[in-house]
Every structure is written in C-alpha cells, then in structure tokens.
Image (cartoon, helix red, strand yellow):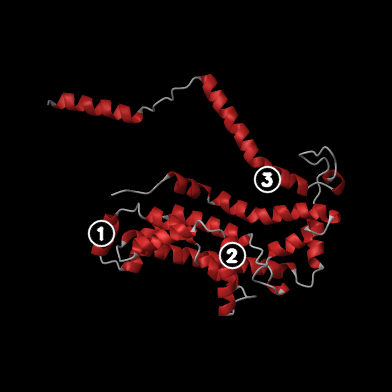
Amino acid sequence: MSKKKKKEKEQVYRKKLITRRKPNRSIAGDIVLYLFLIVVAFIMAFPIIYAVSSALKPLDELFRFPPRIFPQHPTLDNFSDLFVTMGKSWVTFTRYLFNTVFITLLGTAGHLIIASMGAFVLAKYDFPGGKTFFKIVTVAMMFTGYVTQIPNYLILNKLGWIDTYWAIIIPAFASPMGLFLMKQFMEGLPTSLIEAAKIDGANEWQVFTRIVMPNVKPAWMTLIIFSVQGLWNNRAATYIYSEERKTLVYALQQIQSGGIARTGQGAAVLVVVMIVPILIFIFAESQILETMASSGLKD
C-alpha cells in the first residue's frame, strides 16, 4: 500500500472518530423527551420541595384546606421553636447531635474498612470456602433488620453492649450490602494491575491502599452514602435506653409526636433529619452515577 493511500485512510478514520453521531430524532422528539424529563424531575423533587415549604409555613397555613405548595408568608419560626423546645430538655441539643455524629462517623468508617478489606480478598484471591462465604453474604441481604432484631439483641446483651454506642456501631460493621458492593466492583479491576504492583515491590497493604482503593473510589463513596443514611436516621431506641446516649433523630421524633401544637416543629424536624443525607448525596452524586453505570475495567 502506498504512503498516499495509507495517509488518506488515516484521515478518514480520524474523521470518523471526531464526527459525532447525530441522534436519529426530530426536533419535536427532542422537545417531547425534555418535557418528559422535566415532569419526572418535578415528581421526584416534589416531596423535598413540599417538606421544605411546609417547614417555612406559619401554623395557620399548615392547617389551611386545600393546602398550598408554597407558603404565602414564609417564616423561620418553626425552626426557632424547635431549638427552643430542644433547649428545654434536660439533655442538651449538642449532646444528641454528638451521639448521632459519633455513631455515624465510627460506624461508617468501620463498615468501609472491613467491607473493603474483605471484598479485596474475596475478589482477587481463591481460597477454600470463598465462594460459599460470598453466597452466605448474598443470602444475608434478603433479611431486613426486623428479622434479625431479636438474635442481634440476644447477642449484644450477652456481650454487655446494650445501652452503649457499640450496640449500633458494631452491627454496622457487618452490613452485607457494603461487602457485596465492594466485591462486585473490585472484580472489575485487572489482575495484571495488581501483579505489576507486586513485581515492583509493593506488599499487600500497599496494593490495597495505593492501587485498589483509588480505583474503586466510586464504589466506596456510594457505600459511605448508604452507611451514613442508615446510621444518621437510626433511632437506636431498641438498644439504647439512657437519655444521654439517645440519637438526634429519636429526640426530634419525640418532639414531632407532641400533638397538633407542634405541627410546625414537626415539619422543621423532617427538614433537619433529611438535610444531611441529601447534602452528602449532592457532593458525591457523580461517584454514585459512575458506580451504577460502570462495572469497572476488564482484563
């Protein structure tokens, strides 16, 4: 083949790569598609919008019928009344907040570390009973917390952890969802990448921390969001009885159940409870989408 023909073929190939494939849709089709997406987005966002607007309504607008989506006279009185009510409790608001943050941070960190290390072994090493163990983990995902609540209580009671933070933190370490998610994502990592690191002199810990974990960042970011959401919204009423160890969600829900007079505070409680998971989701949205859309690299 002459150099001229070869050059022409290369130019044609480059043009094919550069040229974007136009979607086989008309302008009307695009308009219909965008309108549909706008409607779906509004339906998805409506509960959040209504919760925030309800928290900003004065008490007379909360009982108005038919109800209106947006407040006519927005006010922050519901939030100020909520903090006043919390301030009258013999356990301070900061104590409830500390309990929730401590349980959430420690439980999430332990869950991430244990799930990641276990997933790395299951995904990249063959050992007797490994596949059977993963099948048990998969089956465990079928059981909700209500099914395992009684055996969990009996075990924690034997260990002497009832009415302590560990009654919530330690079971969070063993959540099967994290191990399943991390293992499935780590299986997509090329084994040749790990072998090359070992040839260069890296030990197992260096391979895990410097090669594996950075490459599965979308997976463990998603795991953090799921773990934070579960622990932040955990009332912990089954295992913790002392008021000074209660979580913020428990205290807020007690206020919310105070009757009609606290309807406005109840609306504010809903916003306070959901704001942390929503903010974490917003900051890590791209990582979650990458986790759901990608199965990792393949050998």
Percent coordinates x, y for residue 151 in the rendering: 56, 69
Where residue 134 sits, quadrant-wise, is bottom left
Q: Between residues 168 and 288, which one lies in front from this camera angle? A: 168
Disc ID at residue 230: none
- Disc 1 and disc 2: Cα gap in Å? 37 Å
Drawn side of residue 184 relative to residue 256, left or right = left
Q: Earlier in the sequence, mark 2 or mark 3?
A: 3
Per the image, label 3 sits on a secondary structure element best described as helix
Task: Give the amino acid type for the residue marked by disc 1 in the picture.
Answer: Ala
Please provide percent x and percent y for residue 60: 87, 46
Residue extending farthest to the left is 1
Left/right of residue 13 with respect to residue 219 in the rendered view: left
Total number of numbered discs in the rendering: 3
Compared with 61, 81 (above or below) is: below
Amino acid marked by disc 2: Thr
For image coordinates 57% across by 51% down, the residue present is 281
User: Disc 3 designates what residue?
Assistant: 48
Helix, strand or loop at disc 2? helix
Residue 128, given in percent of the width and then of the height, sits at: 30, 66
Q: Residues within 10 Å of mark 1 (few under 14, many from 20)?
A: few
Mark 1 vs mark 3: give the one in front: 3
Q: Residue at x 47, y 22 (%)?
A: 25
> Which residue is label 1 attached to?
196
| Amino acid type indicated by mark 3 | Ile
The image quadrant that residue 87 belongs to is: bottom right
Which dot marks residue 104?
2
